[in-house]
Image: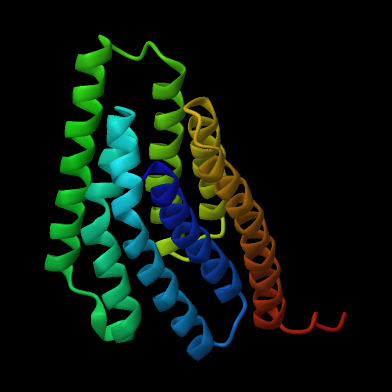
Amino acid sequence: MTLILQLWGGTFYLANKILFSLAEGRPEGRKRLLRMAGWAFYILGVPPWVMILMAERNWIAASIEAGGVPAMLFGLYTVYRGSQGYNRRFNAIAGFFTYGSLVLGVGYSLYEQSGINTLSQILELGVMVGFLVGGYLLARRNPSGWLFFMLMNSSMAGLMFLQDKPILSVQQLLSLGFVIYGYIVAIRTRGEAETQDSGPMPAL
């Protein structure tokens, strides 16, 4: 059963990173379709990840995955609707579920372990910071968000290796490669846009 969950969760999360990285630098219509598919794959991959993380008592990481589902659904809806899809109330509800779940997960982990006393907890905190800050920055089209996704994938790869989940550890490392690719393309695309916006140098 664990093997099936690893294959399910690993495949869908890897597909998410591939689609998101390929969306960088694409024409707006193509980018929108790739991001929609990426959100959909991520959401479908959440259940096996939550089951695996809870079985290993990784409460912080499990709370991020479970609590982030409303935000993922809102992200999918926003990409589908474009500029008309943003809704302040829906955004607030998604944020409430994400941060509320995270508070519960971190709180229970601290209670169970009497603080931050294990390597797995430290890795989970890396996943948490990478997920929250990376998602925040990328939502504002800041390429630095990819750097925090690198932290997230590296931390999760280490956590899965530590807990004898080789398939998920390899999947996270493969995802890291696509995250690096996405970052490079995002930086290159922004540089080209800034060059075009600046126009030619004035004559002396």
Residue at the limit of the structure toward the front, as seen here: 1
90 to 80, vertically: above or below: above
- Of 30 and 5, nearer the camera is 5
Side (left or right) of 81 relative to 3 = left
- Of 107 and 118, nearer the camera is 118
Image mark count: 0
Image quadrant assignment for residue 195: bottom right
Q: Residue at image x 38%, y 38%?
A: 128
Q: Residue at image x 51%, y 30%?
A: 164
- Of 175 and 182, nearer the camera is 175
x and y, in percent, of residue 103 in the image:
19, 34
153 to 60, vertically: above or below: below
x and y, in percent, of residue 117 in the image:
38, 10
- Of 199 and 120, nearer the camera is 120
Residue at the limit of the structure toward the right, as seen here: 204
Image quadrant assignment for residue 118: top left
Side (left or right) of 142 relative to 4 = right
110 to 77, vertically: above or below: above
Q: In the picture, which quadrant includes the C terminus?
A: bottom right
Side (left or right) of 142 relative to 89 = right
x and y, in percent, of residue 114 in the image:
25, 9
Q: In the picture, which quadrant includes the N terminus?
A: top left
Image quadrant assignment for residue 151: top right
Q: Residue at image x 60%, y 56%?
A: 179
